[in-house]
Image: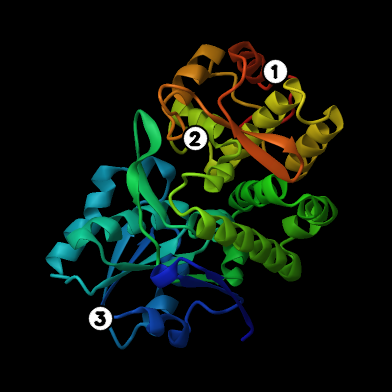
Amino acid sequence: MKTKTLQLSLGERSYPIIIGNGVLGKPELLNPFISGQQVMVVSNETIAPLYLSQVLTALSDYQCETVILPDGEEFKNLDILNRIFDALLQARFSRDATLIALGGGVVGDMTGFAAACYQRGIDFIQIPTTLLAQVDSSVGGKTGVNHPLGKNMIGAFHQPRCVLIDTATLQTLEDRQLHAGLAEVIKYGLIRDADFFTWLEENMDALLARDDAAIAYAIEKSCHYKAEIVAADERESGIRVLLNLGHTFAHAIETGMGYGAWLHGEAVAAGMCMASEMSHRMGKITSADRQRIIDLIQRAQLPVNAPTKISVDRFLTLMAVDKKVQCGKLRLVLLGSIGSAFLSDDFDLEVLKKSISACRQDTMKHEV
């Protein structure tokens, strides 16, 4: 069993990101990060039948309970979150208990938020089973739930004890979910590493074919950049905000269309195209680079177009409910070049409107 371990350095709250194939049921990888005897595994109706038994086998020395949540972004809310609290209280779990999130980003976000809140904070471990969760949401300690008026507006920063990534779980991932995860991988090339973006252009076919070596490399590079950024800015007061490239547009899509209609990665893909369009209109990137971005996102079989069902005015209203809004001013992550991003509140509203409008044209090829 070969593993690659990265370290997210946050002083006493530092933790490893362990990447390997077939690591899911290995007790030696979980036991060092469980302090007490009580463990609750939170999963969903899709993942539990596939992988829960392996995890429970690895935890045979502990008092284990499980919570199985419905699958989907539309269930990432306070009502469903209460099922975790109900289970913890009914089982009389104490402050030294550990929660384990087994699933995608929704399970990870909700489990982490429950861990942050239960008895004012208990340990949790991330075992992400989707590409998007493996390369992004499981790393960095952002936890929370959605509200009908805004995505991820209720939550907390709460770091896991470790992140255990089994690349073998991607073999059972449906194609649409794999493509959605590639959006976040592409994001790292756009904001951090032009050479990695070029590598993605050269290896997209291998990633779509789930080539083990290509997938492992993409996950490792993505986690490296995420860990590096979070270590420098845990609570998003500076550089970490750049990880939100395309996300302000994306959250407007998810909220406006109804949670679950678009996958998060699909909305991020369209959002990055919108951010690229705006960056081009502001003279920050060339038309050639804008086209490279659109082409790569299309090759990943992701949307490059926002839904026409959301009007430009509705987009602006939804984008105003965003965590990056400060003193009433909308701030957007934009591109200075492929491999370099910046945060700005200094832009013409008309340019923003034109950028949104341009990315809603029916001539764009892929609309969910």
The answer to the question of whether label 1 and label 3 lie on touching residues, with beta carbons closer than 8 A, is no
Assign the N terminus to one quadrant of the image: bottom right
Q: CA distance from mark 1 to mark 3?
A: 55 Å
Residue 248 percent coordinates (x, y): 53, 32
The answer to the question of whether label 2 and label 3 lie on touching residues, with beta carbons closer than 8 A, is no
The answer to the question of whether label 1 and label 2 lie on touching residues, with beta carbons closer than 8 A, is no
Front position among marks 1 and 2: 1
State the image quarter where residue 34 is shown. bottom left
Residue 23 percent coordinates (x, y): 54, 79
State the image quarter where residue 244 is shown. top right
Q: Which residue is mark 3?
A: 36
Q: Earlier in the sequence, mark 1 or mark 3?
A: 3
Residue 76 or residue 141, whichever sits in front: 141
Front position among marks 2 and 3: 3
Q: Earlier in the sequence, mark 2 or mark 3?
A: 3
Residue kind at label 3, given as amino acid type: Gly
Relative to 251, 188 lies left or right:
right
Q: Which mark is residue 358?
A: 1
Residue 301 seen anywhere in this rendered image of the structure: no
Residue kind at label 2, given as amino acid type: Ala
Please determine whether, in this image, residue 153 is positioned above or below residue 134: above
Q: Which residue is mark 2?
A: 261
Task: Look at 29% across and 80% down and name the residue there.
Answer: 35
Assign the C terminus to one quadrant of the image: top right
Please determine whether, in this image, residue 242 is positioned above or below residue 196: above
Residue kind at label 1, given as amino acid type: Ala
Task: Look at 74% across and 25% down and name the residue there.
Answer: 364
